[in-house]
Image (spheres, rainbow, N blue to C red):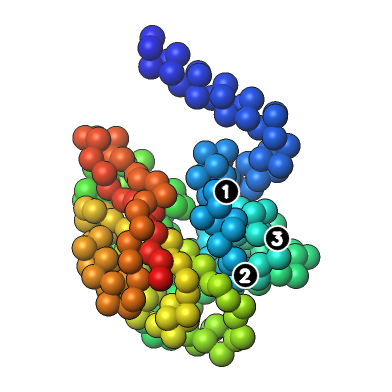
Amino acid sequence: MMTLLSTFHRRFRKFTQLLERPSLLALHKKGVSPDTFDRFSGRWITSAGFRTIIDIGANRGQFTHLTHALLPEADIFAFEPLPDLYQLLAESTNGVSSIKTFNVGLGRQEGELTFYRNRYADSSSFRPMADLHKQQFPFTDGLDTPLTVPVRTLDAVLGGNELKEKILVKIDVQGFENEVIAGGQAVLDRAAMVIMEVSFQPLYLGAPNFDEIYSTMRDRGYFFQGFVDQLIGPLDGAALQGDAIFAR
């Protein structure tokens, strides 16, 4: 009974937040929750002077829409490899001149790679899913459909652009982080902040863990500022992933 009451309370609170703040309702329809908006709407984002946003692993455009609402003057470059999700991203940003979208994956080198499209789109990745992922989230087990997608490097796409500084980069690529970094060193060397989903436990085969990403980012001149949010495993309550903040 207490669990049901707690769930009802959270849903009621979310409903009242949306009613009281119409701007949140518009974002909610684009996949942005009130909690996510509140986490990112602090001065650490809104007053940092970001003029370029690079959204890698844009999905349907949740982070793109969020940052456009918070920083309407910023240029946004959004990358999504899955054709169906990219279509939603492109349609929802159509007519917004400051947002440019790319239907490609980003990696270490240019070409084509197999992408494992999961029925639960947020779990899709260039890397095969590990057993731990399937155990923690059984609804993703056995639902991968391999497809071939084009891959570019971040430097090849944006390295020659006159990007306005300061630059904020968000990377959410389900275990492919080290490959994105390797192909985007010139752009990342100009970025003031990187928000990157990192893993504490092996959710994808061959994926780097937090320690590896932390070392890589430290070597590139960033320092770790903490986490925006963490994903807790429903099976045992262990922390599985976190959205890490790396800043100059």
Relative to 145, is 21 above or below? above
Q: CA distance from mark 1 to mark 3?
A: 13 Å
**Residue positioned most to the bottom:** 160
Residue at 22% of width from left, 48% of height from top? 132
Q: Nearer the viewer, residue 245 or 203?
A: 245
Amino acid type of disc 2? Answer: Arg
- Binning the other alpha carbons within 10 Å of mark 1 as few (below 14), some (14 to 19) or many (20 upward) gives some
Q: Secondary structure under badge 1?
A: loop
State whether residue 111 appears in this view: no
- C-alpha distance separating marks 2 and 3: 9 Å
Q: Earlier in the sequence, mark 2 or mark 3?
A: 2
Task: Indicate the secondary structure of the residue bearing disc 2.
Answer: loop
Residue 110: which quarter of the image? bottom left
Left or right for 15, reference 98: left
Query: What's under tag 3, amino acid-wise?
Result: Pro
Tell which residue pokes out farthest to the right in this image. 95
| Residue topped by disc 1 | 41
Find residue 38 and report its image quarter.
Answer: top right
Q: Please provide percent x and percent y for residue 28.
A: 63, 41
10 Å crowding of disc 3: few (<14), some (14-19), many (20+): few
Quarter placement of the N terminus: top left
- Which residue was labeled with disc 3? 72
Q: Residues within 10 Å of mark 2 (few under 14, many from 20)?
A: some
Who's the residue at 70% across and 29% down the image? 20
Q: Amino acid at mark 1?
A: Ser
Q: Position of residue 11 (x, y in %)?
A: 54, 24
Cα separation between marks 2 and 1: 16 Å
Q: Nearer the viewer, residue 43 or 148?
A: 43
| Residue at numbered disc 2 | 51
**Residue 244 seen in render:** yes
Check the image and report above or below for 210 versus 52. Answer: above
